[in-house]
Every structure is written in structure tokens, then in C-alpha cells.
Amino acid sequence: MTYDLGGDRGTVVMPTYNEAANLPRMAELVLGLPIDGLHLKIVDDSSPDGTGRIAEELAEKYNWDGRRRMSVLHRTEKDGLGRAYVAGMSAALDEGAAYVVQMDADGSHPVEAVPRMLGTAVASGVGLVVGSRYVEGGSLDEEWGRHRVLLSRFANRYARTVLGTKIRDITAGFNLWSAATLRDVDLATLDSAGYSFQVELKFKAVRAGHSAVEIPIRFEERTEGVSKMSLSTQIESAVMPVRLRLRNRRG
């Protein structure tokens, strides 16, 4: 069964840094989804392993018969996941996307869940659909280990408590947004450079009056390469909820 966006366009925004080993498979999976009008936009931060070049080769492969199914946005420096997403999502909106999906390039997010997320957004009219690890039916790869699971659960509970939100997986990086929601948030005003972007964007979307729905997913361990999570991004993630709460209180 092919899902038809009804003339609208959906864009999967996928930031990359040293994902040469994963990208060909991810592009094949995303562009093989039964969704008419789906576009894949790679945002590469000048990966030294040649990810940007591979992305261009893949775009040439998939853009045939006058169809532009894949594009590549090259950035000149690596300055954070949040900045990469803002660049890619802003470009998607400028190109007319009605829905924008955030997805990692490492294989941790189940590509097959995208049609379900899109169907949920269209049927319910919500501005945000979260691919959630922490609602009923959601799960984490057993290879994560107890320490990482506890850290992830603590980070979510901490952010939810500080911000007073009901989104159970507020740190989730697998999300589908309506264009209207992203425009209301105003991506250019986001402060987060790293992983705390996920929390800030959700918080501001809910504050702007947009509803969120969480659907369960299984989060897998990355298939190739190493995690980009650093000490500085962990510190930013800890500080951002408090900063958002204080700003909101002053407002």
C-alpha cells in the first residue's frame, strides 16, 4: 500500500557526520518507503570520511526521470546537531514541505515507523508525533546496557519534571513535525547547539499551543560507527531545561 500525501510534500531531514558506512543503507530504506512525495535531505557537516561525497552520489542515483527525491546540504563546520537540524528543517520549509521528519543516520530509528507517524499526524491534526521509547509498546535495544538505559530514563524524567511537560520521551530524536508548528516555533530563535535541541523544540512547540502524540518505537543500537555524544553536549542537555524554565517564568 502506498501512502499519498495528497499533493503535499514530506521531507526527512537527516544530519550526518562520519556516517559513510550507514548512509547508503539508510537512503535506500527511506526512499523505499511507500510514501508518494517523500524527500530525503542530508545535512552534512563536512565529514572527513567522505559522507558528503557519498550523499551527492546517492542523490544522483535517486534523482532520475525528473524527480528530485534526495538533496544534500553541505555545511562548512561541525557545530552541533541542533544547528544542523535548524539548517535542514528551515531549507525543507522553504522548499514547501508540509511535514518534516527528524531521523538519525545511524540506523537507530526504525524507518518503517515513518508511515505510521505520518498517518497519525494527518488523522489527528497534531503538530508533533514523537517516536517514543517510553510509552507502552516502546523499547530499547538490549545492547544499550543498564547504565545507558538508566541515564536515558533519568534525563527524560529530569527534563519533564523541570519543564512540567507530559511528553514521556521529550529527549527523543525521532519526530515528525507539521510545517505550521515549526513556523510558529521560529527555528531561528532556538538556542541549543547539541542534543538539547530535541527538548527545546518540543517545549516551545507545546508552549505555542501545539499538541503532541507519542507512538511506540523500538530504538536500536547504531549499526556502524561511534556515538557523537560528548561531555559538552551532556552538560548542555542538563542546563537547557533549567534555562528554559527560568525564561518562561520571567515571561
Image (cartoon, grey):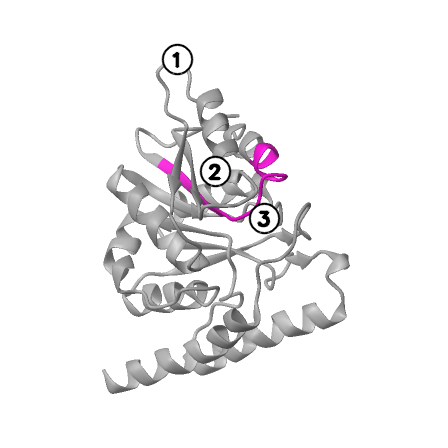
Q: Residue under label 1, please give it.
A: 65
Between tags 1 and 3, which lies in front? Answer: 1
* Above or below, 77 relative to 14: below
Marks 1 and 3 sit apart, C-alpha to C-alpha, by 30 Å
Q: Position of residue 67 (x, y in %)?
A: 37, 20
Callout 2 environment at 10 Å: few (<14), some (14 to 19), or many (20+)? many
Residue 230 or residue 208, whichever sits in front: 230
Asked whether the viewer can see residue 18, the reply is yes
Secondary structure of the residue carrying tag 3 is loop
Residue under the image location 33 percent in, 85 percent down: 246
Residue under the image location 53 percent in, 25 percent down: 1
Q: Earlier in the sequence, mark 2 or mark 3?
A: 2
Marks 2 and 3 sit apart, C-alpha to C-alpha, by 21 Å
Picture disc at residue 52: 2
Secondary structure of the residue carrying tag 2 is helix
Q: Magenta segment range?
A: 10-26
Q: Position of residue 236 (x, y in %)?
A: 46, 74
Between tags 2 and 3, which lies in front? Answer: 2
Residue 57 or residue 5, whichever sits in front: 57
The residue lying furthest to the front in this view is: 48
Secondary structure of the residue carrying tag 1 is loop
Q: Position of residue 162 (x, y in %)?
A: 45, 82
Picture disc at residue 48: none
